[in-house]
Image: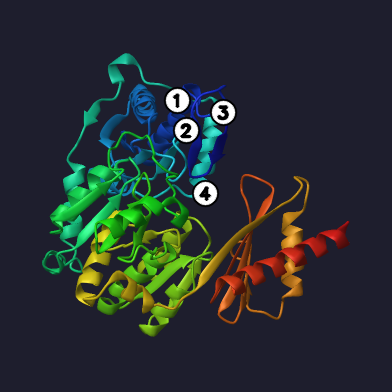
C-alpha cells in the first residue's frame, strides 16, 4: 500500500490502513484541508470537481463532494471528465479551486486528488505546502447545518470544452473534414472514450475505430501511453488500414500518435509537431522541461523564435511560459499546453491542432515524422542509500564537467553538443534519475552509462 503526499496533490493505492494508502479517512482529511485553504486564500466558496473512469472514482468523488459541502462549499460536479476540462471549468465558473480525481497514468489500483488554484492551474509549491500543513494540523472547522454547501451536477462541459477548441483560429475543421481521416482511438477504458470521439466527430472525422473506449476503469493495458503499452493500437491501425492511431492517458492530458505504418510517432514528438504547426502561423517562443527532447528547440529556432527550458513539472512549465510569453509549450510525455485556450496540458486541443497540421501537410503521419530531427532519449536511474548526500554528489559531477554548458535550475543538465544528460533526484525516494538524449539509441545509452560510471566512481572516492 502506498500514500504519497506532494505539493501538487495526494495519490496512493486504494484500500489498506489509514495513513498508509489512499483510504476514505485520508481522502476526507486532505479534501478538508484543501477546501479550507481555498476559502482562506480566495474567499470563494465554490469548487469544481471531476474524475476519470477509475473503478474507485465514484467512491472517491462521493467522499470529496460530501467533505467540501461539509465545509460550506458549493460543489460543481462535472462527473466523468478530463483534467483539462476541469481546469477550464474552474475558470469559467470563477471558482475558488478545483479537484481532479485521477491518478493519471498510474495503474487502476491507484487514485489521486490533483489540486487546482482559482486560475485553473496546479497549485504552486508554496500553496501545496500550506495545504499539507493544514491537513496535519487538524485545525479544519466545518460548517453548521444551515450553512452546508450545495451539490450542483453539470454535464455541459464536454460540449463547452469542444466548443472552445473549435473556435480557435488555428483549428481548421474544414481541412480536417476534407482529409477524410480514418482514425483508431485507444482511450484505455477511461473518460477519453467519451471525450475524444465527441471531439473527432465535431472536427468532421467520420471514420473512428474505438479500441478500449468503454469508460469502466478496467484498464486493458498499462495506461501510460508508451510504445510497449500500445501494441494493440499499432496492430489495429494496420488491420483497419487507418491513417493514424491516437492514444490518451486516463485523464486525457497526455497524447501520442501511431503512424499509418504501425510505428509510434513518439510521445516526445507530439509537442514538437504541434509546436511546428503553431510556429508556422504564430510568432512567439516555446517552452518545455529540461528532460524533453532537443527537437523542440531545433524546430523553434528554425522558425526564428526562441526556446526556453523549465524545471520538470507542469506548474514550472506554465510559469516559464508566462514569463517568456510562449505561444506553445508542454512536456515530452505528450503534454501539450496551448495558452490560447488555457494553461494546462490538454490532449483534446493537441488532437485538433495536430489533425489540422496533418491535413494541411497533405501527406502521411510517417512522412511528417521524417521531417523532424531524430533524437533518442534513454531513461535510467541509480538507487542510493537514504542518508546519501545527493546534492553534494550532483555538485561533484558538475565540477567534473564544469567546462561543458550546464544548468542547475532542476538538478543538473549537461550539454555535449546536440547531446545532453539530465540528472535529478526524486522527491519521494533515494534515487537519481538519469535522462540522456543523442541522435541514436546507442549514443544516448553510451552517455547514460558514462554518467552512471562517473557517479559510482565519485561515490567510491567519498567512501
Residue wearing tag 2: 109
Of discs 1 and 4, which sits in the foreground? Answer: 1
How far from the left and from the top, in percent, is residue 274? 32, 68
Dot placed on the residue nearer the N-terminal end, 4 or 3: 4
Dot placed on the residue nearer the N-terminal end, 2 or 1: 1
Q: Is residue 142 above or below residue 174?
A: above
Between 185 and 34, the residue placed more toward the observer is: 185
Residue wearing tag 4: 125
Q: Secondary structure at mark 2?
A: loop
How far from the left and from the top, in percent, is residue 323? 42, 67
Q: Are the residues flagged by discs 4 and 2 in contact, CB closer than 8 Å? A: no
Residue 407 figure quarter: bottom right
Residue wearing tag 1: 28
Q: Secondary structure at mark 4?
A: helix
Q: Secondary structure at mark 1?
A: helix
The tally of labels here is 4
Amino acid at each position: 500500500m502506498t500514500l504519497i503526499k506532494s505539493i501538487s496533490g495526494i495519490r496512493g493505492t486504494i484500500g489498506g490502513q489509514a495513513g498508509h494508502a489512499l483510504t476514505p479517512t485520508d481522502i476526507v482529511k486532505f479534501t478538508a484541508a484543501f477546501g479550507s485553504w481555498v476559502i482562506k486564500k480566495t474567499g470563494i466558496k465554490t469548487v469544481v470537481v471531476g474524475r476519470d473512469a477509475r473503478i474507485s472514482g465514484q467512491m472517491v468523488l462521493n467522499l470529496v463532494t460530501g467533505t467540501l459541502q461539509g465545509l460550506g462549499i458549493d460543489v460543481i460536479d462535472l462527473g466523468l471528465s478530463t483534467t483539462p476540462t476541469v481546469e477550464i471549468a474552474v475558470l469559467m465558473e470563477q471558482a475558488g479551486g478545483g479537484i481532479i480525481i485521477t491518478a493519471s497514468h498510474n495503474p487502476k489500483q491507484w487514485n489521486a486528488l490533483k489540486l487546482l488554484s482559482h486560475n485553473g492551474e496546479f497549485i504552486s509549491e508554496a500553496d501545496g505546502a500550506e495545504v499539507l500543513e493544514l491537513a496535519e494540523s487538524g485545525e479544519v472547522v466545518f460548517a453548521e447545518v444551515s450553512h452546508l454547501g450545495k451539490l450542483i451536477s453539470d454535464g455541459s462541459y464536454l460540449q463547452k470544452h469542444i466548443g472552445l477548441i473549435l473556435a480557435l483560429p488555428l483549428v481548421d475543421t474544414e481541412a480536417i473534414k476534407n482529409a477524410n481521416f480514418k482514425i483508431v482511438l485507444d482511450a484505455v477504458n477511461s473518460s477519453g472514450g467519451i471525450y475524444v470521439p465527441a471531439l473527432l466527430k465535431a472536427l468532421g472525422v467520420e471514420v473512428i475505430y474505438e479500441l478500449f473506449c468503454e469508460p469502466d476503469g478496467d484498464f486493458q493495458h498499462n495506461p501510460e501511453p508508451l510504445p510497449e503499452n500500445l501494441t494493440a493500437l499499432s496492430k489495429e491501425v494496420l488491420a483497419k488500414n487507418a491513417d493514424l492511431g491516437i492514444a490518451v492517458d486516463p485523464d486525457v492530458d497526455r497524447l501520442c500518435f501511431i503512424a499509418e505504418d504501425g510505428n509510434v510517432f513518439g510521445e516526445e514528438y507530439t509537442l514538437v509537431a504541434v509546436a511546428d504547426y503553431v510556429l508556422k502561423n504564430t510568432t512567439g517562443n516555446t517552452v518545455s522541461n529540461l528532460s524533453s527532447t532537443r527537437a523542440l528547440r531545433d524546430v523553434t529556432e528554425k522558425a526564428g523564435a526562441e526556446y526556453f527550458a523549465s524545471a520538470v513539472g507542469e506548474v514550472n512549465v506554465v510559469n516559464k511560459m508566462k514569463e517568456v510569453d510562449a505561444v506553445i509549450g508542454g512536456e515530452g510525455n505528450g503534454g501539450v499546453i496551448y495558452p490560447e485556450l488555457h494553461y494546462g496540458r490538454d490532449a483534446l486541443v493537441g488532437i485538433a491542432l495536430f489533425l489540422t497540421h496533418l491535413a494541411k501537410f497533405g501527406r502521411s503521419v510517417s512522412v511528417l515524422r521524417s521531417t523532424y530531427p531524430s533524437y533518442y532519449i534513454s531513461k535510467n536511474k541509480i538507487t542510493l542509500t537514504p542518508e546519501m548526500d545527493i546534492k553534494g554528489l550532483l555538485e561533484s559531477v558538475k565540477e567534473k564537467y564544469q567546462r561543458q554548458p550546464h544548468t542547475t535550475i532542476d538538478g543538473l543538465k549537461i550539454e555535449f553538443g546536440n547531446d545532453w544528460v539530465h540528472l535529478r533526484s526524486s522527491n519521494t525516494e533515494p534515487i537519481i534519475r538519469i535522462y540522456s538524449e543523442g541522435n541514436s539509441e546507442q549514443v544516448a545509452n553510451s552517455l547514460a552509462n558514462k554518467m552512471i560510471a562517473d557517479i559510482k566512481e565519485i561515490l567510491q572516492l567519498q567512501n
